[in-house]
Image (cartoon, rainbow, N blue to C red):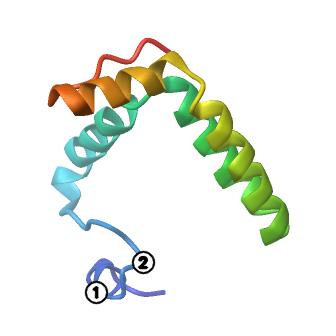
Amino acid sequence: MIDATTALAWNLVSEAVPHDELLAAAHRLADEIAANPPQVTRMTKRLIREGMHMSLASLLELSAAYQALAHQTVDHREAVSAFLDKRTPQFSG
């Protein structure tokens, strides 16, 4: 067991907050995740789950396939367009 300060220093976690700020921090993180394209968020979650049970080679192959699928979505076109227009993307899923 290590404490939160050590975990942060070792880059095992991206943020450490006091107990009374935990719920607000979790909501901020959830909002950031929810702002992403839903199809790609689902693919990412699947890659994380599958990665625990797959070989690296298989995981990289699946990641490449998902990336190819993601590039064919309406949300990808919206992301590129928003980037070029310097605006916040509006993802539709």
Residue shown at 36% from the left, 80% from the top: 11
Residue shown at 73% from the left, 61% from the top: 60
Residue nearest the observer in this picture, 15 or 44:
44
User: Residue type at mark 1?
Assistant: Ala
Hey, which residue is sitting farthest front in the picture?
Answer: 84
User: Residue type at mark 2?
Assistant: Leu
Residue nearest the observer in this picture, 46 or 6:
46
Residue shown at 56% from the left, 21% from the top: 73
Question: Where does label 2 land, which residue?
Answer: 12
Q: Is residue 33 above or below residue 22?
A: above
Q: Residues within 10 Å of mark 2 (few under 14, many from 20)?
A: few
Residue 9 place in picture, x, y as percent? 28, 86
Q: Secondary structure at mark 2?
A: loop
What's the CA distance linking mark 2 and mark 1? 8 Å
Q: Residues within 10 Å of mark 1 (few under 14, many from 20)?
A: few
Locate residue 77: give its quadrant: top left
Residue 45 place in picture, x, y as percent? 61, 43
Residue 67 place in picture, x, y as percent? 62, 43
Q: Secondary structure at mark 1?
A: helix
- The circle drawn on residue 9 is 1
